[in-house]
Image (spheres, rainbow, N blue to C red):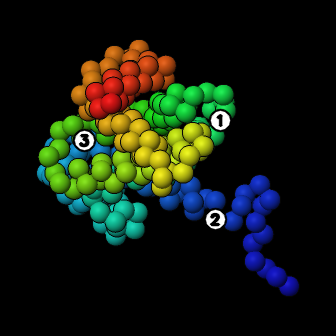
């Protein structure tokens, strides 16, 4: 007779373990970002992060491959949100407007807005090469997503037509500037305000190089 515990139909096997893992990962990330903001990225050790999150160093390494990996640990989820948002934009929207709108909405639909603000503070204040490498790696991924979406909406081959790649790079650069340098009020954080601001910046930048 099989005496193994039966798994409830409403409680998939491993779901509790998965939730626990995600909660621990999120806690480490939040504690680390607060320490980075308070002490500076280079001045925080993995031991301090582990202590703040009440986990041992082994647990930290199980969740993160390095200290700077914490900065964009949620990048795959964010990119998936961006893809889903891009797919939801009506087909009759112009390619440029569709991509800008999707980027603005995805950026502002993060589950923890306060964490996004903490990350922006860390990115503005840290001179660490590791931090800048993490930023560049993430921005390259976003640029690729935007270029792919622009090429699809323009109906062109990005290997032959440079416009999707150029516009994708311009959009990422404008977004970076807004994130790092703009003094945004709470009202400016709305998708429509952010969309208008980035669109204007990109259009002006493109005019300069025409």
Which residue is at 21% across, 37% downward?
124
- Measured in 3D between alpha carbons, the distance from the residue under mark 3 to the one under mark 1, in whole angstroms, is 30 Å
Residue named by callout 2: 14
> Mark 1: which secondary structure?
helix
Q: Position of residue 163 (x, y in %)?
A: 44, 41
Is residue 168 visible to the viewer in this orientation of the structure? no
In the image, 106 versus 15, the foreground residue is 106
Q: Position of residue 160 (x, y in %)?
A: 48, 52
Instruction: Classify residue 107 as left or right of residue 50.
Output: right
Q: Residue reaching furthest right? A: 1
In the rendered image, which quarter contains the N terminus?
bottom right
The mark found on residue 123 in the picture is 3
* Sequence-first tag of 3 and 1: 1
Which residue is at 52% across, 41% downward?
150
> Mark 3: which secondary structure?
helix
- Measured in 3D between alpha carbons, the distance from the residue under mark 3 to the one under mark 2, in whole angstroms, is 36 Å
Which residue is at 52% across, 48% downward?
148
In the rendered image, which quarter contains the C terminus?
top left
Nearer the camera: disc 3 or disc 2: 3
In the image, 162 versus 29, the foreground residue is 162
The mark found on residue 88 in the picture is 1
Q: Are marks 2 and 1 in contact (CB under 8 Å)?
A: no
Q: Position of residue 83 (x, y in %)?
A: 57, 45
Instruction: Classify residue 151 as left or right of residue 51.
Output: right
> Mark 2: which secondary structure?
loop
Q: How many marks?
A: 3
Nearer the camera: disc 3 or disc 1: 1
Callout 1 environment at 10 Å: few (<14), some (14 to 19), or many (20+)? few
Nearer the camera: disc 2 or disc 1: 1
Q: Position of residue 66 (x, y in %)?
A: 29, 63
* Sequence-first tag of 3 and 2: 2
């Amino acid at each position: 007779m099989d005496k193994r515990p039966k798994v409830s139909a409403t409680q998939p096997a491993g779901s509790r373990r998965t939730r626990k893992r995600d909660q621990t990962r999120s806690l480490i990330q939040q504690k680390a970002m607060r320490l980075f903001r308070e002490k500076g990225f280079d001045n925080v050790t993995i031991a301090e992060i582990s202590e703040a999150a009440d986990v041992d160093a082994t647990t930290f390494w199980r969740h993160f491959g390095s200290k700077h990996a914490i900065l964009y640990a949620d990048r795959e989820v964010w990119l998936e949100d961006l893809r889903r948002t891009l797919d939801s934009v009506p087909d009759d929207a112009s390619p440029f407007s569709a991509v800008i709108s999707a980027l603005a909405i995805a950026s502002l639909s993060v589950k923890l807005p306060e964490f996004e603000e903490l990350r922006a503070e860390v990115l503005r204040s840290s001179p660490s090469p590791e931090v800048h490498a993490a930023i560049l790696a993430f921005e390259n991924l976003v640029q690729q997503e935007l270029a792919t979406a622009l090429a699809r909406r323009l109906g062109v081959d990005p290997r032959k037509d440079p416009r999707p790649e150029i516009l994708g790079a311009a959009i990422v650069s404008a977004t970076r500037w807004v994130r790092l340098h703009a003094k945004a009020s709470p009202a400016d954080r709305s998708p429509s305000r952010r969309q208008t601001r980035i669109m204007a910046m990109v259009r002006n930048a493109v005019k300069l190089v025409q």
